[in-house]
Image (cartoon, grey):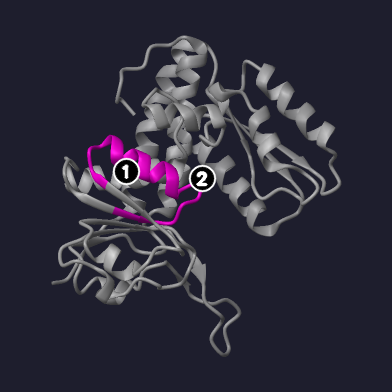
Amino acid sequence: MTAERIDGKAFAAGLRERVGEFAVSFEQAAGRKAGLAVVLVGEDPASQVYVRSKGKACLAANMASFEHKLGDDTSREELLGVIDKLNADDAVDGILVQLPLPDHLDEQEVIARISPDKDVDGFHVINAGRLSVGQSGFVPCTPLGCMMLLADRLGDLSGLEAVVIGRSNIVGKPMAQLLLDANATVTIAHSRTKDLKSVVKRADIVVAAVGRPEMVGKDWLKDGATVIDVGINRLPPEEGKEKGKLVGDVDYGEASEVAAAITPVPGGVGPMTIAVLLRNTMVAAHRNAGVALEEGAL
């Protein structure tokens, strides 16, 4: 068996195109563009790259981008003040504070300060609660992107056994909840799970989100499983190369021998995250402006 390659890059491009179409009609209806504000605190190189890419994606999707870059020494009061202003700004539909923050700032306090109706990252405790009890709210972008890929590949997930490896608030827990809402039978596995390999091996769907390079090999997987690899790890550079190879939490070569379908790294889940961020912002814009949006349209 040779696994089908789940092309997240192509799926994300299609989603971004649809968001752009909705952005045009929204501007006509609301008299303004949908807007995403990104707050960057500090000089973390990776965060700077992410912020630039989000800004470019907004502009490409006919949306307004607002960037607020603050220094490493930004105080708690200064950062919360910026968020308060963005909460009150009708031109801003979504607010994203780029993580991680400098050590002297409390990430949970900062996230809690964002209006739940502008929390397009889906990290606010109110949105987490809404997801938990089945109410409408914003869902973290990476898990929602994973669900879109699964639905596109498998259709109805009812009755399928799913194992999520990882229990983070950003990916593992919301991923498990989304799968449960889709009527899958769900197990959350983690570093304390006994005989982890055998737990994973019974799954029809495996979502790996632990941050351990190529941990999941072919002997971990059930024949015909669908594998979603959320991990992104950089291996040590080979001799003569400045940067090491990017790999996921799944050994793609091995897993492809037994899985029915698998996401690659890069080019799988990664592109979905920004596409879903744009989608969430567009949904927020419609809600905030009182412009109707058909359920499931995005």
Along the horizontal axis of the image, is 267 left or right of 75? left
Residue 217 % position (x, y)? 31, 75
Pointer 2 residue: 169
Mark 1 or mark 2, whichever is nearer to me: 2
Using the rendered view, name the quadrant where residue 95 is placed.
top right
- Using the rendered image of the protein, determine whether residue 201 is visible from the camera's viewpoint: yes
Could you say where residue 155 lies in the image, as x and y percent from the top left? 17, 42
Q: Residues within 10 Å of mark 2 (few under 14, many from 20)?
A: few
Q: Which residue is mark 1?
A: 147
Name the foreground residue: 143 vs 288.
Answer: 143
Tell whether label 2 touches label 1 (CB within 8 Å).
Answer: no
How many angstroms separate mark 1 from mark 2 (CA)? 16 Å
Please state, as top left, top right, bottom left or bottom right, where the N terminus lies in the image. bottom left
Q: Quadrant of residue 205?
A: bottom left
Q: Amino acid at mark 2?
A: Asn
Give the magenta part as a residue range: 163-185
Q: Looking at the picture, does residue 168 appear above or below residue 125?
A: below
Looking at the picture, tell me which residue is in the foreground, 286 or 128.
128
Q: Where residue 281 sits: x, y (%)?
A: 49, 29
Mark 2 element type:
loop
Residue depicted at 24% across the width and 66% down the height: 201
Towards the viewer: 176 or 113: 176
Q: Residue at x 35, y 32 (%)?
A: 18
The residue lying furthest to the bottom in this view is 239
Amino acid type shown at disc 1 = Met
Answer whether residue 129 is magenta in the image. Answer: no
Task: Give left or right: position of 240 versus 72.
Answer: left
